[in-house]
Amino acid sequence: MYRAQSPPRKYEEYAYVLDFNPRGKSTTVRGRDGIIITSIGEDRLTLLEVLGVQNSSFEIGEKIYIGKEGRTKISSVLGKMEYDNISSAAQSELSTVVETIVTTNETKFVEYLNNSRPLTPRIHALELIPGIGKTYMKTMLEEREKKKFESYEDLQDRVGFKDPVKHISERIMDEISGESRMNLFVKK
């Protein structure tokens, strides 16, 4: 009997350290302890609890490899975390780290702005990004028809939309903290 293949599960390759406890206990896997790291995945922007390799050192904001093959500092990804369950230290680091991710992955986010579509007949995905109202949205749609945006700077120059990194980061923060009903960037 032929069964449709389920899509391959997407795993994070990299994450950023938000907080860590050198002698912590896992909140996602019972009985696991050691270097417990709260991190955010670079691609799917999911909050993850990760177990560090003994005697490894970590820094807040550090980019760590958590992919399947060849991990050096991470022994395992323990599980997903909810925003409300991460430490206040991790919560306070989050917006800085999110801005780093949005800055570092400029191509990916600019591509999103170039290709985003209406979500409902009345709401366009672009409008859900703070700072983009009907006026900016209309200009952005007109400009990207002529030529796709190449960078945040290109977007700023052609549309006048200031500080896209800050606004996209703000949207991601709303999604992570559960304040928005619909997610544009954060994968559940």
Image: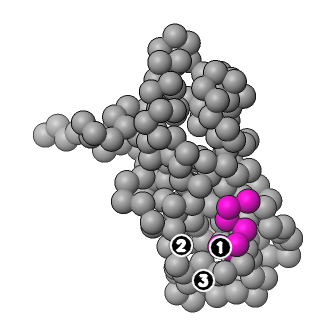
How many numbered marks appear?
A: 3
Residue at (47% x, 18% y) in the render: 142
Location of mark 3 (residue): 26
**Where is residue 65, by image quadrant?**
bottom right
Q: Depth check: 166 or 161 in front?
A: 161
Residue at (70% x, 86% y) in the render: 24
Magenta span: 90-96
The residues bearing labels 1 and 3 have C-alpha atoms spaced at a distance of 17 Å
Residue type at the position of mark 1: Gln
Q: Depth check: 100 or 12 in front?
A: 100
- Tell me if label 3 and label 2 are in contact, CB under 8 Å: no
Residue type at the position of mark 2: Tyr
Q: From the viewer's perspective, is the residue at label 3 or at label 2 nearer?
A: 2
Does the magenta-highlighted stretch encompass residue 44?
Answer: no
Mark 2 or mark 1: which comes first in sequence? Answer: 2
The image's mark for residue 83 is: 2
The residues bearing labels 3 and 2 have C-alpha atoms spaced at a distance of 15 Å
